């Protein structure tokens, strides 16, 4: 539902207190002005610089800069025979005053009789307790693809500047999630740099914008599944889910979207690298969410930053969202939030609700080294499409990884390789990198590598025991089975993985 549709519905229902959350005030005001013109409603706007400005008489600008005077002006213009709307821009800055709170309360309550409406336009929702039940919140969505296309046509006016077909789709994909002003700036930068609209300049600005926010990081590498050894079942599952997940289900008349996967494994087995390769494989940007960056020092700031990050992620769809080592990110939630006054528990509750209910085309990949530190509801059905265990690579997978990293670091195929029992892919990469760095044979470089299966043998064994029969295998179709942890009867009955 658009902003215009939402506001019209609320005003028809006589919701006299409306809070519009928007970072694009001029666009929101333009939509409200068009709505009031169509419905023949009286519109007044106020900000601290210009004061109250009636939409039909801009010459009155400059009076009533005081917040209380702005609210009082509504009394003089309100008329029960017509609808009057007062839009207060960035008014959240003035809601710490008891006098202002009381004035807002009276105008919202009296507006039921006088058909006058108080609309607060601000980038955040900060309602004092006295006003929480008097206001309803409306989200001003960022530009959709149709609006981005109009902006692109307004910027690229000369012949040859605006691409067509698939090239235009690539430009719109790069601009998705930007505000209208940011997208206009990105298109202008592309014209200055390339003489036409190209996605590279837009991606660059988008990456910097997300980095400046401190909440998300954008990855756009050149690696795909061909540069990642092993994980054949996991690769096939995610590729099929993302490539075919939007097919139409005729019986239910709705589109099925892939939700995501959770990856459990010892460190160094390729979980994070898989996430980055997945985006390039299926043509989606990869967003990395650092939950630690969501923590704020003020009361309620962490929860607010969490909601802001999730809104940005929804706006960036379609995309892949990576949350690395999620059990550490929400470690405080496992203890009930005793050590942080419940902040981590509330943040995790917000994330779980979004994970279960979000309608945006976001494929979530969570990685964990110790799933026992997470509550069971985190990995329940319908939050993820599958929970995979990424075990230490087998002989076939290790041979493939050796081949990839030998080629990457310029090591001859005929050079002898060290004993790699219980090695992870990260340790194979480390051995090849050290051999190239120190200019020594692989066998000599291996003397500097201590595998995680040796340094943390107990935790690896415990992780395998937990995953046995509970997770899907990342290398073979079906449920993960580990011979050392399975009982003799279990091994004889399930010697072959299920094809389901």
Image (tube, rainbow, N blue to C red):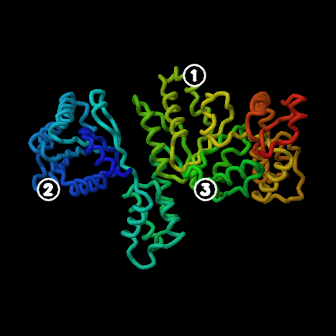
Mark 3–mark 1 CB contact (< 8 Å): no
Give the secondary structure at mark 3. Answer: loop
Image height check: is 9 above or below 135? below
Q: Position of residue 322 (x, y in %)?
A: 59, 45
Q: Which residue has dot 1 on it?
A: 335
Q: Position of residue 42 (x, y in %)?
A: 16, 50
Q: Nearer the viewer, residue 427 or 142?
A: 142
Q: Position of residue 396 (x, y in %)?
A: 85, 50
* Residue at screen point 39% across, 62% down: 184
Q: Which residue has dot 3 on it?
A: 247
Question: Rounded to the nearest whole Å, what is the CA distance between mark 3 and mark 2?
Answer: 50 Å
Q: Which residue has dot 2 on it?
A: 56
Q: How many marks?
A: 3
* Residue at screen point 47% across, 43% down: 309
* Residue at screen point 11% across, 39% down: 75
Asked whether residue 78 appears in the rendered view, the answer is no
């Amino acid at each position: 539902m658009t902003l215009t549709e939402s506001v019209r519905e609320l005003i028809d229902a006589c919701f006299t207190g409306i809070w519009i959350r928007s970072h694009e005030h001029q666009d929101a005001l333009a939509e409200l002005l068009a709505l009031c013109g169509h419905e023949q409603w009286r519109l007044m706007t106020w900000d601290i610089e210009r004061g109250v400005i009636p939409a039909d008489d801009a010459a009155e600008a400059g009076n009533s800069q005081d917040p209380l005077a702005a609210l009082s002006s509504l009394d003089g213009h309100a008329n029960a025979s017509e609808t009057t709307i007062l839009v207060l821009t960035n008014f959240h800055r003035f809601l710490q005053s008891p006098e202002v709170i009381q004035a807002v309360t009276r105008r919202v309550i009296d507006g039921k009789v006088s058909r006058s409406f108080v609309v607060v336009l601000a980038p955040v929702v900060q309602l004092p307790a006295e006003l929480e039940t008097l206001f309803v919140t409306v989200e001003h969505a960022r530009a959709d693809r149709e609006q981005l296309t109009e902006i692109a046509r307004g910027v690229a006016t000369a012949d040859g500047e605006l691409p067509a077909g698939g090239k235009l789709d690539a430009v719109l994909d790069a601009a998705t999630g930007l505000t209208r002003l940011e997208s206009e700036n990105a298109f202008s930068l592309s014209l200055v740099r390339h003489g036409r609209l190209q996605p590279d300049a837009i991606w660059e600005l988008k990456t910097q914008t997300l980095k400046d926010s401190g909440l998300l990081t954008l990855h756009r590498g050149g690696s795909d599944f061909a540069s990642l050894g092993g994980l054949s079942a996991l690769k096939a599952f995610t590729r099929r889910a993302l490539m075919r997940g939007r097919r139409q289900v005729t019986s239910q008349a709705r589109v099925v979207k892939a939700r995501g996967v959770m990856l459990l494994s010892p460190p160094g087995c390729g979980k994070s690298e898989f996430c980055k390769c997945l985006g390039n494989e299926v043509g989606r940007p990869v967003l990395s969410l650092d939950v630690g960056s969501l923590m704020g020092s003020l009361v309620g700031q962490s929860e607010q930053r969490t909601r802001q990050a999730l809104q940005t992620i929804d706006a960036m769809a379609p995309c892949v969202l990576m949350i690395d080592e999620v059990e550490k990110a929400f470690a405080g939630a496992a203890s009930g939030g005793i050590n942080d006054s419940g902040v981590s528990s509330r943040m995790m509750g917000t994330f779980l609700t979004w994970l279960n209910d979000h309608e945006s085309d976001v494929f979530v990949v969570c990685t964990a080294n110790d799933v026992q530190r997470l509550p069971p509801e985190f990995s329940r059905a319908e939050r993820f499409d599958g929970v995979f265990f990424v075990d230490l690579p087998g002989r076939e997978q290790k041979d493939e990884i050796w081949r990839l990293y030998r080629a990457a670091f310029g090591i001859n195929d005929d050079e002898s390789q060290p004993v790699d029992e219980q090695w992870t892919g990260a340790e194979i990469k480390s051995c090849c990198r050290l051999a190239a760095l120190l200019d020594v044979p692989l066998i000599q470089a291996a003397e500097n590598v201590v595998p995680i299966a040796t340094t943390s043998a107990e935790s690896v064994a415990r992780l395998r025991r937990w995953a046995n029969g509970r997770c899907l295998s990342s290398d073979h179709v079906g449920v993960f089975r580990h011979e050392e942890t399975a009982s003799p009867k279990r091994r004889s009955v399930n010697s072959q993985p299920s094809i389901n």
